[in-house]
Each structure stands twice: as structure tokens, then as C-alpha cells.
């Protein structure tokens, strides 16, 4: 029936795995929970000790880090059941989370549940940008995501037929963070697989500090530009890429401006700004200031 696949990296997952195991047992379905740690720090390996004692869990540690795409492919290959549920490790699930997917399993080859963010009374200043970006850019009801189902694709909370996951692999050449999901969604579209979005969100708990968030953003933008060369069709639905293509035609006149904006925007963000327009301008400036190679 169901293989639940969780790549782990620097996060404690016992609470999540316990909740998943309990829900699956309540449904009385055949299930397994495959957890692979991609060389987390010793602190987190210690926190996750005993995972294999939870009912249905198979837990292993990688000897070396293989990256976000390769670990998802590895989990697909290890899975024994016909339906796969991919989850990021830094999430929390709601009531009847698994049941909602089972109820929809015959309606689409690929089902995306979405993501949500908790309201915080207090949140550390250096995590507010990541929270605001998630709340206002990533959190979307299914009605809106279904308007552009492939452009809204995310693998952090993904229910998929195993045959599809075996045919469409995550691209392992993208070893750094960012846009693995963009390419996967594009491949699903190119191969005419159906994608349906439902309201079954996970709560994203892992809020990066601003320095880490900006570093991940930069890796993602570098990946995006590499996709322009290798998979140009995958970039067609990305708004910032369209702005980039338009502006770079005049870059010989404007590059100095974007170098200045890149510096100023990064400084504002590092100093606590959570203005998403500043963040967008930083991303665009970063892309335009990269060397062509």
C-alpha cells in the first residue's frame, strides 16, 4: 500500500515519525516508513537514535552526503509499496493526514498537499525573513495551486504512484540546494502525468536564519541559471527568470546599478529587513551580477 519516504538532514524526526506510524496503524493499511540520514551532524544522529524501534520504520545512515535529489531516488528504489509519500524531515503533520491522501489516491497520479506556517507570538529576528517568505509566497490553498499545477509543484509533501516516481527521476546533477522540484514538476508536465493539489498541508518547522536562507537562495538561483541551458522549458513559469531575461539585454548599461542594489539589499536583509520586494530585488541583482560561466 504505502511507503513513507523521509530524507533526514540535521533535524530531529522522532515526533514526526511517531505521528505517521500511529496514523498508518489506525488506518490498518500495509505501510513502511523509510528514513535515510544524509550525514547529519552527530547531535541530530544522537537525537534520532531508536527510530528503527518505531513500528514500520526502516532507518539507515549514509556514509557520505549524496544530496537532495539522489536521496529521493534512493528512497524510491528502496520502497516496496505502490504508493509513495515524500516528506521533508523538518515538518509536522495534522490530523487524518495520511487518510486524506488515501481518499484521493485514485484521482490523480501525483498529489501535492501543500505547506503552511505557524503563527508565532515571538520569533527570532534572524528567522523572520524565512517565515514571511514561506507564509506569503509558499503557503497557498489548493484552489490557487491547481490553476497552475506544475508551476506550483513541491516535493516536500508529495503523494505519488511508484510507477511515476520510477519513470521520472529527480535530477542528481543538481547537487546543491534549489529548483530540484521545479525541474521535477516540468518533467511531469512534459510526460503528461496528472498533478492534483489538495488542502493537506504539512507545517514547515525548519526556519533558516537569514544568512543560511540567503545562501540557499543563491544556490537555487545558480541552479536556475544552469537549468536555462540544460532544460530551458522548465524555466518558463518562473517569474524572476522572465525579468532576468528581459533586463540582461541592457546589462552593459545597467550592471553597475545592479551591483549597487545587490550590496544594499543584502545589507538590509542581513540587518533584519523582511521586505519581500527587497528580497526579490536582491535575487534579481544576484542573478544579473553572476559571471556568464
Image (cartoon, grey):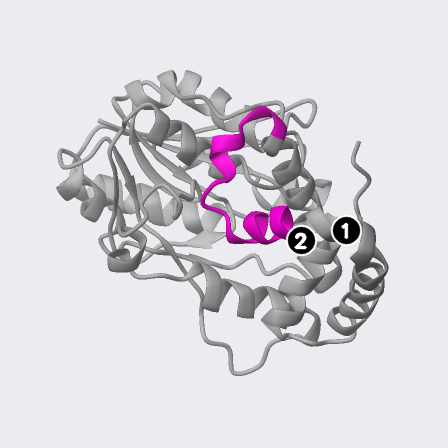
Q: Which residues are magenta?
A: 229-246
Q: Position of residue 165 (x, y in %)?
A: 36, 23
Would residue 259 appear left or right of 194 to someone viewing this image?
right
- Of residues 149 and 241, which is closer to you in this image? 241
Crowding at dot 2, Cα within 10 Å, few <14 / some 14-19 / many 20+, comes out as some
Q: Position of residue 237 (x, y in %)?
A: 45, 45
* Quarter holding residue 291: top right
Would residue 268 appear left or right of 139 to someone viewing this image?
right
Q: Residue at x 41, y 62 (%)?
A: 139
Q: Residue at x 64, y 50 (%)?
A: 244
Looking at the rendered image, the quarter that the C terminus falls into is: top right
Q: Which residue is mark 2?
A: 247
Real-space CA distance between mark 2 and mark 1, rounded to the nearest whole angstrom: 6 Å
From this view, report whether residue 240 is shown above or below residue 33: below
Q: Which residue is mark 1?
A: 251
Q: Do residues under tags 2 and 1 come within 8 Å of each other at their CB atoms?
A: yes
Residue 157 numbered mark, or none: none
- Asked if one can make out residue 60 in the rendered structure from this viewpoint, the answer is no
- Based on the picture, tell me whether residue 231 belongs to the magenta stretch: yes
- Of residues 208 and 262, which is closer to you in this image? 262
Q: Position of residue 90 (x, y in %)?
A: 52, 51
Amino acid at each position: 500500500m504505502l511507503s513513507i519516504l523521509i530524507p533526514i538532514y540535521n533535524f530531529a524526526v522522532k515526533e514526526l515519525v511517531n505521528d505517521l506510524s500511529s496514523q498508518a496503524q489506525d488506518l490498518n493499511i500495509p505501510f513502511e516508513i523509510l528514513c535515510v540520514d544524509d550525514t547529519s551532524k552527530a547531535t541530530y544522529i544522537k537525537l534520532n537514535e531508536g527510530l528503527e524501534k518505531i513500528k514500520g520504520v526502516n532507518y539507515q545512515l549514509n556514509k557520505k552526503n549524496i544530496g537532495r535529489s539522489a536521496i529521493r531516488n534512493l528512497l524510491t528504489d528502496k520502497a516496496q509499496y505502490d504508493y509513495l509519500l515524500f516528506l521533508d524531515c523538518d515538518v509536522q503533520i495534522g490530523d487524518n493526514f495520511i487518510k486524506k491522501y488515501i481518499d484521493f489516491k485514485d484521482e490523480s497520479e501525483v498529489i501535492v498537499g501543500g505547506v503552511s506556517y505557524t503563527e508565532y507570538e515571538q520569533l527570532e529576528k534572524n528567522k523572520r525573513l524565512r517565515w514571511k517568505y514561506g507564509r506569503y509566497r509558499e503557503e497557498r490553498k489548493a484552489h490557487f495551486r491547481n490553476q497552475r499545477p506544475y508551476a506550483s509543484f513541491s516535493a516536500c509533501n508529495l503523494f505519488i504512484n511508484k510507477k511515476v516516481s520510477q519513470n521520472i527521476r529527480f535530477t542528481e546533477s543538481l547537487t546543491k540546494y534549489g529548483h530540484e522540484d521545479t525541474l521535477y514538476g516540468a518533467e511531469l508536465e512534459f510526460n503528461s502525468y496528472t498533478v492534483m493539489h489538495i488542502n493537506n498541508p504539512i507545517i514547515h518547522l525548519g526556519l533558516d536564519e537569514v544568512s543560511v536562507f540567503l545562501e540557499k537562495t543563491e544556490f537555487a538561483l545558480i541552479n536556475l541559471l544552469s537549468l536555462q541551458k540544460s532544460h530551458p522549458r522548465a524555466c518558463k513559469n518562473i517569474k524572476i527568470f522572465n525579468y532576468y531575461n528581459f533586463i540582461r539585454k541592457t546589462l552593459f548599461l545597467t550592471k553597475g546599478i545592479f551591483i549597487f542594489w545587490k550590496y544594499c539589499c543584502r545589507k538590509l536583509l542581513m540587518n533584519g529587513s523582511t521586505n519581500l520586494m527587497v528580497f526579490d530585488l536582491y535575487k534579481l541583482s544576484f542573478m544579473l551580477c553572476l559571471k556568464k560561466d
